Amino acid sequence: MAPQELSESQAKKLAGSYRATAVSTATPGVLILMLFDGALRFIARAEHGFTLESLARRNEEVHNNLTKAQSIVRELQVSLDLEKGGEFSGQLFALYDFMVDQLLEANVKKELERIQAVKNFLQDLRDAWAEMLQKFQNQ
């Protein structure tokens, strides 16, 4: 018996269900990692938007994805525990503010360089977070 083919809408529904389950069962540390991954994914989509020939589609793709990335960076920012995290949390809060500002400016001016700078910061933070999670899992 051959496996049943899924329609695109069925596949999207299953993927959405999988994501919802993954989020609802993830530890707080893994949720933060998922936020980093989501922001980086939307930034990559915004970067891809710069390659589109249609100016309207390009602007829409860049705008929509940068707006989503900004929202995720804000979510990372509000997840900080400024009391327990001390000076480091305060510095990270300021860095997230800077990144949101850069994404906003990049969106308004359609500047790829600002997007890439934020992507580099987020990738470094994501990699450090993943490494920390791995170390705690191995203990």
Image: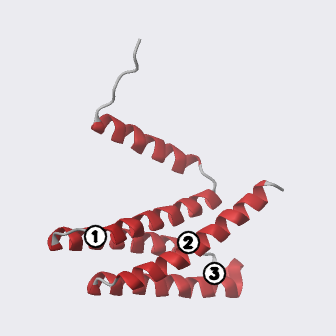
Pick the front one: 98 or 6: 6
Give the residue drawn at x 69%, y 88%: 87
Q: Which mark is residue 13?
A: none
Q: What amino acid type should be assigned to the residue bearing mark 1?
A: Thr
Q: Check disc 2 and give the amino acid type.
A: Gln
Could you tell me residue 131's position as x and y percent? 70, 64
Colour style of the rendered protein structure:
secondary structure
Residue under the image location 29 percent in, 38 percent down: 8
| Residue 52 coordinates in the image, percent (x, y) | 23, 68
In the rendered structure, which disc, 2 or 1, sits on the residue that comes first in sequence?
1
Q: Residue at x 33, y 30 (%)?
A: 6
User: Which of the labelled discs sits on residue 123, or is there none?
Assistant: 2
Residue 80: image x %, image y %?
Answer: 60, 75
* Disc on res. 82: 3
Q: CA distance from mark 3 to mark 1?
A: 40 Å
What is the spatial separation of the Cα atoms under label 2 and label 3, in whole angstroms? Answer: 22 Å
Task: Please say if the residues under marks 3 and 1 sit with CB atoms less than 8 Å apart.
Answer: no
